[in-house]
Image (cartoon, grey):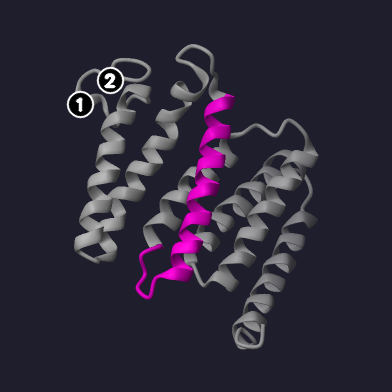
Amino acid sequence: WPGDAPGNYHDFHIWVRGGWAAMELVTISVGLVALRFYRLPFLVAPIAFTLWYLSMDLTPIILGSDGYDWRDRQLVSLLFGLAMLVTAYLTDLAARRDFAFWLYLFGMIAFWGGLSSMDSGSEWGKVIYLLINLALIALSVFLRRRVFIVFGGLGVFGYLGYLAYDKFADQPLFMFVLMAAGLALVFIGIYLQRNRTAI
């Protein structure tokens, strides 16, 4: 086994270990073979799910079983999720049927989970996090994928919650600013919906 011994199978969903990588690679290979013979979009689900788990289990293998910390796991998850999203987009372009949905979903879980669990440490880092989530929302319009707007919306909501509870807790005007921003978002959404074909 690469990395740590995997232990018992019932620990698979509990512990992140490099030893699971062999089983995950076999699962992905069998899924790809099945997908080759049976062109069903749902067969991508176990492949994408296992790729998500593999993104977590690769960290001990890439960085050594003792040479990594939580920050390294976050970075590997973010980069692996980004690679899955690019793969999903390329699959979307090449396939006539929707084989990319599951890759988008689990790629976004890996990417957004790694991004959201990182501690920015500064106000500018939090603003960059907000901008990335706003970009995900905008990307959902152009890719016509709801998974981007769901995760982007969660990120924006988290940032607004941070502002409401930490920065503007005693400012009653902040509620009106949020209300105006919400109304602006609704009008932007209506505008984009009406002009989607032209855009």
Depth order, front residue of 110/65: 65
Please, which residue is most extreme toward the top here? Answer: 66
Where is mark 1, residue-wise?
A: 9
Looking at the picture, how far across and down is residue 53, in whole percent?
A: 37, 37
Query: What number is the disc on residue 30?
Result: none
Query: What residue appears at the point 59 percent right and 26 percent down from the top-left corner?
Result: 71
- The quadrant of the image that shows the C terminus is bottom right
**Label 1's element?**
helix
Quarter-of-image position of residue 136: bottom right
79 to the left or right of 9: right
Is the C-beta separation of discs 1 and 2 under 8 Å?
Answer: yes
Q: Is residue 40 visible?
A: yes
Q: Is residue 41 above or below residue 151?
A: below
94 to the left or right of 117: left
Amino acid of disc 2: Pro
Where is mark 2, residue-wise?
A: 6
Query: What residue appears at the point 53 percent right and 60 percent down from the top-left corner?
Result: 148
Q: Is residue 17 visible?
A: no
151 to the left or right of 54: right
Looking at the picture, how far across and down is residue 82, in whole percent?
A: 55, 48
Looking at the picture, how far across and down is residue 159, in whole percent?
A: 66, 47
Query: What residue appears at the point 30 percent right and 36 percent down from the top-left corner?
Result: 24
Q: Is residue 121 above or below residue 179?
A: above
Range drawn in magenta: 71-100
Amino acid of disc 1: Tyr
**Label 2's element?**
loop
